[in-house]
Image (cartoon, grey):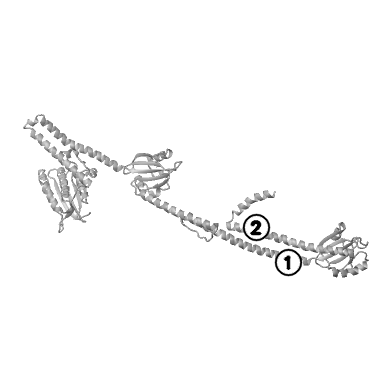
Amino acid sequence: MRQSIYISAAPIYSVVMSRFPIFWQLLLAFALFVVLPLVALGLIGGGWMRDAGLQAVEERLRSKAALLDELVRGQNLEQLQGRLRSLREEFGPRIALIGADGRVVAESDRDDPSSLADREIASARAGLVGVTTRHSATTQTNTMYLARRVSNAQSLVEFVRVALPIADIEKHVRHLQWLTWGTAATTAAFALFLAWWLARRVVRPVQMIREGAAAVAAGDYGHKVYSERQDELGALAGAFNQMSERLASQFSQLDHDRQQLRAVLGSMVEGVIAVDAAQTVLFANDRAGELLEFGVSQAVGRRLWEVVRYRPVHDLVERLLSAPELGGQNLDWLGPGQRSFTVHAAPLPGRPVRGAVLVLHDVTEMRRLERVRQEFVANVSHELKTPLSVIVACAETLQSGAVDDVENRGRFLERIATQAQRLFMLIVDMIDLAKVEAGTEQFKRDEVAVDAAVLACIERHQERARAKNQRLEAVPPARIPPDGVTAWSDPDALSQILDNLVDNAIKYTPAEGLIQLHWWAEDSKAIVEVRDTGIGIPEHELPRVFERFYRVDKARSREMGGTGLGLSIVKHLAQAMGGGVRVASQVGQGTSFTVVLPQTDVG
C-alpha cells in the first residue's frame, strides 16, 4: 500500500516542482532532504532523551524500593518512622510506608501522614510494582512515584513507595533538547547555504546558456557564453559556443547566398516569381513587377491573384500545382502597352508539391523584330520584283521583235535603264543601311563646316528643284559664330543625310513650293533643319516614317522612284554620329526634319 502511494505521489511532486525555476527546485529538494531529517532527529532525539532520563530515575527508584523491602521486614511502626528520616538522607528519594487500606502509616518528609489514594498504589495492587509521574503538592514539582508491594510484610505495612523529583531530569533534557535543536538549526542553515551555493553554481551556467539561446533565437548568431567550469556544464557551454559559431557561419553563408541569388535574379532580364502551395508569393524580382505591372515590395506574402490580375497566369500555376511537371506557355498581355510573354513554369522540389516558379520571357521585341524581318523580306521582295518585272517584260518584248521597231525600241530601252538605275539605287541603299546598322561602316569624323555642307547640297539639287519650279534656298543663322557652325561628323555621312532629306523634300513638294535649309548652333550642338511646304504627313504616321520601306503614300512614292530607305538611312547615320533626327509635320502645310549633331568629339 505504501509503495502504491509513493508511486502515485512521485508524478504529482514532479508536476508541482516543474512549475518552479530549477534554482528553487534544487534548493527545495536540498531543504526537504536535509532540513526535514534534522527536524525529525530533533523531535525523536528530544523524546528519547526524556524517556531515557525517566527510565534511569525509574530504575533508581526500583532499586531503592527493593532495598526498603528488606529493611522494613520485622520492624514496628515507631522504629520505621524513626528510621525513615535517616533513610531519606541516605537514599535520597522520599519514602512512604502504606498500609493495606492505602493510608500512609509512615513518611520520611512528614510527621503526620495522611491517607492517600494514588494511581501507583492501584497499579501495585494489580501487580508487583506501580509507577506514575505527577505534580507533587508537597514539593510543588513534577515527581516520579514508584510503589512496591512488600513481600512477607507485616499486617500494618502493605506497600513501600519511593519518590524522586524529576525537575533536574527535565532541565537536563530541555538543555539537551535545546542543544540538539541548535545543532540541527545550525546544520540546517549551513546545509541551506551550501544548497543555495550549489544550486546557484549549477543554475548560473544554465541561465547563461538559456540567455545565449534566446540571443541566438533573436538573431545574434555567434553569441558566446563564458564558463570557467571544467565539468559537464562547462562542456555544455563549450558545445553551445561551437553550435553558435557554426550557426553564425552557416547563416552568414546562407545570407550571402541569398543576397547573391537576389542580385542574380534581380539583374535578370526575365521576370521570376516563386509561390508556395497556397499560391502565396514567396519572391518576385523587379523585372516580373515591370512585366506584369505590380509593386514587388508589396507582393511578397500576398496571394498571386491579389498581385497579378491576369487569369492565364493563375490557370498555369493551378495546373502546375495539381499536375507537377515542367511546362511552358505563350501569353499575350492585354493591358496597357500590349506585350507577349513566354512563361516557363517548374514545381518546387518536395512531395507534395511545395509551390512553383514562373520565369517570364518578354518576347514582345522579338516578335516585333520578327514582324519587321518578315515585312522587310516582303518589302525587299516587292521592291526588287517591281523593277525586275519591268526589265524582264521590256527585254522579252524586245526579244519578241520590238528590237527591230525603230520607233518604239528606244522607249523600251529607256524603261530598262530607268528600272535598272532604280534597282541599283535600292541595292546601294540597302548595303549602306546594313553597314550602318551592323556598325561596320568606317567613319572619319572631323570638324565639318555645316554651312559649306548645306551650300554644296543645294548646289547638287538646284537643277531638280528648278525643273519642278520649286525654290530651294539656304537660310543662315541670325547670329553666325566667329568660327562658323561646325559639326563633329564624317563629311560624306553629313552629305548623305542632307541629300536624302532634300531629295525627299523635292519629291513631296508640289510646284511653286518652297524648300529651305536652316542651320545654327545650340548647347554645343550643330542643328540642321530641312523645311518644305509639301503635302505633309498625317500625325499617326509620324512614328513610322523612319522605318525601312515605309511609305505614307506607297503608290505615289514608287511613281517618284523612291526606295523607301532614305529616311531610315538618315536616322541611322545621325545616331552613328552621336546625334539624332526628329520630324514635325502638318498635312497640306509641309514637313520639317531636324538633324542634331555634336560639335565636338563625344567618343
Q: Locate residue 133: give its quadrant.
A: bottom right
Q: Nearer the viewer, residue 315 or 37?
A: 37
As drawn, the label of residue 175 is 1
How many neighbours does mark 1 have within 10 angstroms: few (below 14), some (14-19), or many (20 or more)? few
Which is nearer the N-term, disc 2 or disc 1? 2
Q: Secondary structure at mark 2?
A: helix
Kind of residue at badge 1? His
Q: Nearer the viewer, residue 129 or 484?
A: 129
Q: Secondary structure at mark 1?
A: helix
Asked whether residue 60 is in view, the answer is yes
The number of discs equals: 2
Which residue is denoted by mark 2 in the rendering? Answer: 33
* 603 shown above or below 72: above
Kind of residue at badge 2? Phe
* 589 shown above or below 215: above
Task: From the viewer's perspective, tell me whether residue 212 is left or right of residue 499.
Answer: right
Asked whether residue 109 is in view, the answer is no
As drawn, the label of residue 141 is none
Task: From the viewer's perspective, tell me whether residue 226 is left or right of residue 98.
Answer: left
Q: Nearer the viewer, residue 14 or 57?
A: 57
| Residue 518 image offset from top left, x and y in percent | 16, 51
Q: Locate residue 64: give its quadrant.
A: bottom right
| Residue 54 image offset from top left, x and y in percent | 79, 63
How many neighbours does mark 2 have within 10 angstroms: few (below 14), some (14-19), or many (20 or more)? few
Tell me what residue is drawn at x 14 percent, y 51 percent: 453
| Residue 366 image offset from top left, x and y in percent | 29, 42
Task: From the viewer's perspective, tell me whether residue 46 is left or right of residue 25.
Answer: right
